[in-house]
Amino acid sequence: MPPEDSQNFDGVWTFTGAGCPNSGTVGAKIIGGKIIVKGGGGQVDPDGTLHSVGAGNGLTLTAVGQLSGNTGSGTFNRSDGCIGHWVAIKQGNLRGRRP
């Protein structure tokens, strides 16, 4: 079983992008440090470092950033050359657990 640190970001998250046309909000789950999102995926390290890739609307993107507690932020680069930023908010825990 992984150390508790590697699971402190597990849950349901909302990621919102800005700075590029047609940026928007997507929901994602983080399970065991793996990001699960429609059209992509990625990894969150135990220290909160995030790396993700995705595709949609004819574009691909790569995202990097940092999660800390129940929030996070970073940047993304799209295949059309646009560079934007994102913010994330944890909406809840998995399995219906509440603090």
Image (spheres, helix red, strand yellow):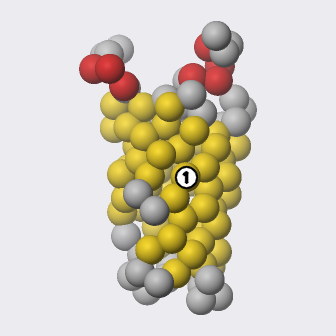
Question: Where does the N terminus fall, quadrant-wise?
Answer: top right
Element assignment for label 1: strand
Q: Residue at x 37, y 70 (%)?
A: 24
Q: Position of residue 50 (x, y in %)?
A: 65, 47
Q: Position of residue 83 (x, y in %)?
A: 62, 79
Q: Residue at x 55, y 52 (%)?
A: 41
Q: Position of residue 28 (x, y in %)?
A: 41, 47
Q: Is residue 14 left or right of residue 9?
A: left
Image vertical order of residue 58 relative to residue 63, above or below: below
- The reply to whether residue 57 is in sight is yes
Furthest residue toward bottom: 80
The residue identified by callout 1 is 41
Residue 94 occupies quadrant: top left
Question: Where does the C terminus fall, quadrant-wise?
Answer: top left
Observer-nearest residue: 16 or 95?
95
Question: What amino acid is at disc 1?
Answer: Gly
Q: Residue at x 50, y 31 (%)?
A: 31
Furthest residue toward left: 96
Q: Is residue 52 left or right of residue 20?
A: right
Q: Residue at x 47, y 46 (%)?
A: 36
